[in-house]
Image (tube, rainbow, N blue to C red):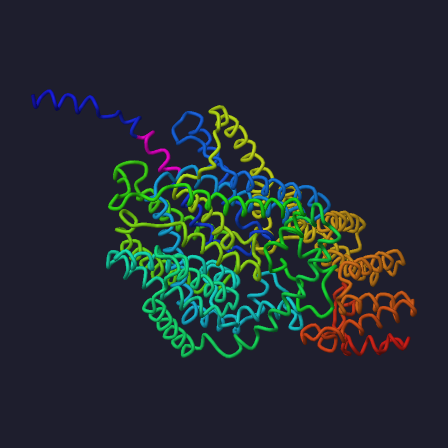
Amino acid sequence: MSKQRHIDKRREKPPATASLAQHVPGILLAATVALLVATPLIPSEAAVPEGTHSTIGMLWCLLLGCWSAAAAVQLVPPLRLDWTMIAGLVLIGLHSLSAIIMGSTGGGRPALNTVWVWVSYGIGAFLLRQLITSAVQTRAVVAVMIALALCLSTHAVYQYFVSQPSFQADYKADPEKFLKEADYSTDKQSVERKHLEDRLFSREPVSTFSLTNSLAGFLAPWLIIAAGIGLGAITKGGNSRTLAAIACAVLIMSGCLLLTKSRTAMLAAGFGGLLLLLYGRPDGFKVGWKIPAVAVGLLVLIGLGVVVAGGLDAQVLSEAPKTLLYRFQYWRSTAAMISDHPLQGVGPGRFQAFFARYKLPEASETVADPHNFLLEVWATAGSPALIALLAMLAAFAFELARRSSRIAEPAEGATAPKVNRVSDQHPGFVLGGASVGMLLGIALAIMTEHIVLGYHNGGVVIGLVLLGLPIAAAFLWGVWHWIWEGELSPSPLVIGMIVLGVNLLVAGATSFPGVAQTAWILMPLALGLKESVSRLAIPRWSSFVAAGLSAVLAAACYFTSYSPIIYSSLPMSAAEMIPFQSSDQLAGQYSAAAAADPWSAEPWERLAELRLAAWLRNGFAGDLEDFKKAADEYARREAPSTRAAENRARWYLQMHVRSQEPADLEQAIEAARLAADRSPASARIHAELAAVWKLADDDSAAQMEAEEALRLDKLNPHGEFKLKNHHLPRYQWDEAEQTVVTIARSETTEQTMLELRKGLRPKP
């Protein structure tokens, strides 16, 4: 009898291939989690201008293709599609369409980079919706993301006390070297340099981000979700090890959030905490006094500790009205932009280039987004995209409400079905994917060579790897019992989304992958806790259609994002890093980069400057012809921006100094006028145009522009933009060097404008 049993068991054992096929969903989920974890480790602020997330975007497309192939041969669960997902796909489609159409008129590279950032959001949310089939997996993903937030918080605290002061000391020792490596202006009066130094010498930590507000925006929702899990565990009498791990995570993340001094994120987190007390508990509105009292007491202690460490001061509160005033200025300008481009917007990735045209004279800076996610989508992708975004949020809320009202509660004493500990639903797949994602994210961040505090002076090695990772691992060990046996309702996830939404309403950053990705994680997780009642029936042949579309999408990503950015960065890096190259060798590097990425303006800009410098030295007609071609190609690709027009005006002014040809001066005047048209509220740009008109002996035009420059200067209260703090450049021929040199005028720009307004020639 026992022998027969042994034979039967042996017959029932699945073959090795069947066992591997059984784990395909788990492997795909692990890969999904790896990309989710890697994303915040790469500087998000450079994703649009520099394409730092192009490799992540390519990997998302390939992963979607793998899932489609597995779905076609029925190795993964059937396709799930609901109204939230449909609205999200429509949103991403409209967003991408606007980028393609508007980006064809200039600014194509940032527009395409934005497209693939948003496509990555959609693929990530789609795969989570398809691959997560148990509450255990949902809890594992949530635990991993909280652990990641804890890891970055630890890194940020290390930055604040150790690596950041060290980095600042290194910068002070040789600022010019740093600025050249980072491709920033070395001019001490440069506004660009001032803004960079303001960030570098601020005490707020940034972790793996470039801006402290981005770090705060990432931390706030996961902090509230962790607090919600802890609140639920306390209510249910949870495991003591789990409670200790969550309590430590909440304390560290709260302290880090306070160190960022992000008023918006702290306000959003406070609002989320209130929602947790009201709606995050099983007993609904009944809020006892013990939990709030303990929470407030701990926050007071954390706040006192941060104040003692110098992380909080009175300026955090005193500057709040000024910050809100700046936001209103941004929103007024954005409203005017929307009014002029209501249908398709100005194009994703092109907001900053167009914002200069609508910027108020009293505004502080030319921002990259309007600091409001609804206005950002409306202004960049148009009204249809905004409607799709609102429809997606409405569908998400409606499906959650229908599910909560129609699905019966489990009977008293009933327990959730146990997950087979050797199946594809084992949380080990999620944790393994998270480990791979950490390595991948750090490697890609270092490869981008994007200069941020977190990746210098050992910050990434000590703060992130040696300190952050062990603490994150200890947290996962602490909540392991909760992952297997605990409970997670949609409430903390939804409240986390609300916290993120409140922050994005004032901080923006929809195209910062490390920040905005959180929303696209929480929606499918909340919907997947219990199957949505509005799930749509999908025929099997749709899997083959999805496989075909995935192949097309991957090819499009490769040829428009991954390949151009990778293969253009190689010659650009070679041009900067290989010493003692001739002008022709450098020109070859820039030409190769331009050929590799037909949408990028940077290689043409470098090539134009190189050929102009060569022509100024030797006067060869070939160099002049090459310069004009490169300048025209650069202007065409960078069409919306003020900077492109300013560069062209500067180039032709230098040419005029050498050639004394009226045609060159006319080109400089045309470019300077275009710059003023693109930045009508800039006193400095109008002052530069006035000086060009004076050079052309048009006193009337010079007087008008000088008057406008002085008028705008009075309206702007910010010292770094005041004309009295700047000097206009003067171009003159250097006989010894046989080239054109740029020197600053002895008088301030304000003095020059006052003289021009009188119709007098400025003093030499």
Q: Can you give x and y, in whole percent of width and height, for residue 133 in the image?
A: 37, 38
Q: Can you give x and y, in whole percent of width and height, for residue 36 in the image?
A: 44, 48
Residue at the left extreme, as displayed: 1
Q: Quadrant of the C terminus?
A: bottom right
SS majority, magenta: helix
Residue 735 in view (yes/no): no
Q: Can you give x and y, in whole percent of width and height, for residue 749 in the image?
A: 77, 75
In the rendered image, residue 539 lying in the magenta stretch gets the answer no
Q: Which residues are magenta?
A: 20-28
- Taking the spot 40% from the left edge, 68% from the top edge, the residue there is 255
Position of residue 266 relative to residue 74, above or below, is: below
Residue closest to the eye, 461 or 745: 461
Residue 661 in view (yes/no): yes
48 vs 134, left or right, is: right
Position of residue 696 relative to residue 31, above or below, is: below
Residue closest to the eye, 720 or 339: 339
Q: Can you give x and y, in whole percent of width and height, for residue 236 in the image?
A: 28, 55
Q: Quadrant of the N terminus?
A: top left
566 vs 352, left or right, is: left
Residue closest to the eye, 259 or 129: 129
In the rendered image, residue 25 lying in the magenta stretch gets the answer yes
